[in-house]
Image (cartoon, helix red, strand yellow):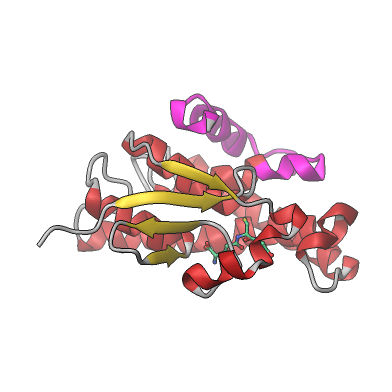
Amino acid sequence: MSLPTLVRIFESHRAPNPRRVSIFLAEKRVEVERVEVDIMAGEHFADAHRKKAGSHHVPVAELSDGSFLTETVAICRYVEALHPEPNLMGADAKETAVIEMWQRRMEFSVLQNIAFVARHTIPAMQALEHEQVPEWGRACASRMEEALKGLDERLRESPFIAGARFTIADITAWVALDFMRVLRRGPPDGCEALLEWHDRVKARPSATV
Ligand SMILES: N[C@@H](CCC(=O)N[C@@H](CS)C(=O)NCC(=O)O)C(=O)O
């Protein structure tokens, strides 16, 4: 039996997690209908959105069997199964585990801290938080810097985050770094390898989405 196809993605196109899915799809050269959900206007809290998959977040993927998927990596994993090439999540068990390891590290150390700094220190982002806690945002700023320095160290020894080739771990980290624009700051001084990798990834056609 064939797998349900991807019908459309509900997204907020400037937000980091939907953007990770968009870049993943662009790398695979998969085109799919998009439905914009304005999270700054609270559209994601509407019942119509929440009932789709029991979550108020974006992205949400609608499949041809009428079901929905949330969670960026779950959506990417399904897209990888439907469109295996180019491989972005690992070709064998060892490589899959290594890529997953780096992807999780990028999600929890880099993306999450950047997102917390933005969501808890930028007044307009109060719309996304029940309670904005600026002290927490400031605490996450030093964690963010440590994470970026750690990533710079990794990129001094490896051309891409998970190894010799571009993978989903690079997508997660690159989207996070690009999202730092809202903070009006870049990585800490001295992160030359990180900046060089950033520019290389930025030159990929997928980075324009
Ligand atoms: N764990 C989810 C997180 C999704 C998420 O946090 N999406 C953000 C946009 S980047 C969102 O929906 N924000 C709205 C909110 O937090 O209220 C995933 O990996 O997709």
Is residue 186 visible from the viewing direction of this image? Answer: no
Quadrant, the N terminus: bottom left
Count of marks overlaid on the render? 0
As drawn, 26 above or below 18: above
Residue at figure coordinates x 36%, y 46% from the top left: 163
Q: Is residue 190 magenta?
A: yes
Residue shown at 49% from the left, 43% from the top: 34
Asked whether 207 or 37 is in front, the reply is 37
Pick out the residue farthest to the front. 48
Left or right position of 82 against 162:
left
Q: Is residue 195 left or right of residue 121?
A: left
Task: Please identify the residue farthest to the left as the structure is shown.
Answer: 1
- Image coordinates of residue 87 in percent, x first then y, are 27, 45
Rendered image quadrant of residue 139: bottom right
Residue 76 is inside the magenta segment: no
Which x, y percent locates residue 203?
Answer: 50, 24
Q: Quadrant of ligand 1?
A: bottom right
Who is closer to the viewer here, 51 or 142?
51
User: Is residue 177 toward the left or the right of residue 209 in the image?
Assistant: right
- Asked if 14 appears above or below 90 in the picture, the reply is above
Q: Nearer the viewer, residue 63 or 101?
A: 63
Q: Looking at the picture, how far across and down is residue 33, in whole percent?
A: 43, 42
Magenta region: which residues?
Answer: 179-208
Task: Look at the image and tell me whether residue 32 can be seen.
Answer: yes
Residue 96 drawn at (x, y percent): 28, 59
Please identify the dominant SS of the magenta region. helix
Residue placed at 52% from the left, 75% from the top? 54
Residue shown at 55%/60% (left/top)? Answer: 107
Q: Nearer the viewer, residue 59 or 148?
A: 59
